[in-house]
Image: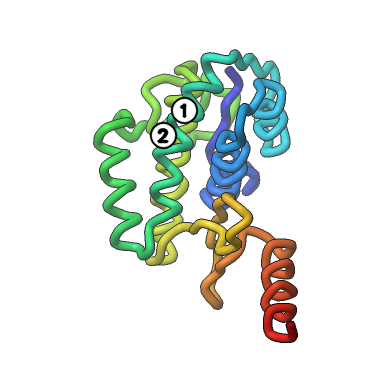
């Protein structure tokens, strides 16, 4: 498996990896995500070929996504850190550096092996990215969309107002609905 999650040319920074995590959590939270759908998300977020993904891999990644959703659901940095710490202790290997046999710059991994199972890789790399975001920003690394009609998670990157919605589309839909309720 050609997994490179380090920081070559900024392509796989913690914020980029956290966005990949959110995209995968959202895709894997769908009713019945297919191998093709999950592979498409992985490719869209820079996963290299060959990309060999099976139904059992998607099932393991769904289990990981459910655990990661708890981090996104945390109300504050303390609760997010507690949930991340629990995942790090129970589901990841020790921090190690890898260059994938010299095919990439050295970068950190928390999975046990460069060719480990997809579910383990997804959970470990996501925990690493979310932990670095929490550490750097001293706030929860993301959240759950505030739109009642949406179940998506989002990543909080940078400073500014607290984000409440996963996208402009959800924010606009809720503003329009609130306006209609106020004028109705």
Residue at 61% in and 16% down? 53
Q: How is the image coloured?
A: rainbow
Badge 1 vs badge 2, beta-carbon distance below 8 Å: yes
SS category of the residue bearing label 1:
helix
Identify whether 33 is placed above or below 116: below
Q: How many marks?
A: 2
Neighbour class for label 1 at 10 Å: few (<14), some, many (≥20)?
A: many
Locate residue 180 relative to residue 89 in the image: left or right.
Answer: right
Instruction: Report the Cα–Cα distance between label 1 and label 2.
Output: 5 Å
Q: Position of residue 34 (x, y in %)?
A: 66, 23
Foreground residue among 26 and 118: 26
Q: Quadrant of residue 178?
A: bottom right
Residue at 40% in and 50% down? 71
Residue at 44% in and 49% down? 130
The quadrant in which the N terminus is found is: top right
Neighbour class for label 2 at 10 Å: few (<14), some, many (≥20)?
A: many
Q: Quadrant of residue 176?
A: bottom right
From the image, tell me which residue sits under label 1: 121
Identify whether 59 is placed above or below 156: above
Q: Position of residue 68 (x, y in %)?
A: 43, 42
Residue at 71% in and 22% down? 36
Q: Position of residue 64 (x, y in %)?
A: 44, 32
SS category of the residue bearing label 2:
helix
In the image as oriented, which residue stretches furthest toward the bottom? 183
From the image, tell me which residue sits under label 2: 124
Res. 74 in view: yes
């Amino acid at each position: 498996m050609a997994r490179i999650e380090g920081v070559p040319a900024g392509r796989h920074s913690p914020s980029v990896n956290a966005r990949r995590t959110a995209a995968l959590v959202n895709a894997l939270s769908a009713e019945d995500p297919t191998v093709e759908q999950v592979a498409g998300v992985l490719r869209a977020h820079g996963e290299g070929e060959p990309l060999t993904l099976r139904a059992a891999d998607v099932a393991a990644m769904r289990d990981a996504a459910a655990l990661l959703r708890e981090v996104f659901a945390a109300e504050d940095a303390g609760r997010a850190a507690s949930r991340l710490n629990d995942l790090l202790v129970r589901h990841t290997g020790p921090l190690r550096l890898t260059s994938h046999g010299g095919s990439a710059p050295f970068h950190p991994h928390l999975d046990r092996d460069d060719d480990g199972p997809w579910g383990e890789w997804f959970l470990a790399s996501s925990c690493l990215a979310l932990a670095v975001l929490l550490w750097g920003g001293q706030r929860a690394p993301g959240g759950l969309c505030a739109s009642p009609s949406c179940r998506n998670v989002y990543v909080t990157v940078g400073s500014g107002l607290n984000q409440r919605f996963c996208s402009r589309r959800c924010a606009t839909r809720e503003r329009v609905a609130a306006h209609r309720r106020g004028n109705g």
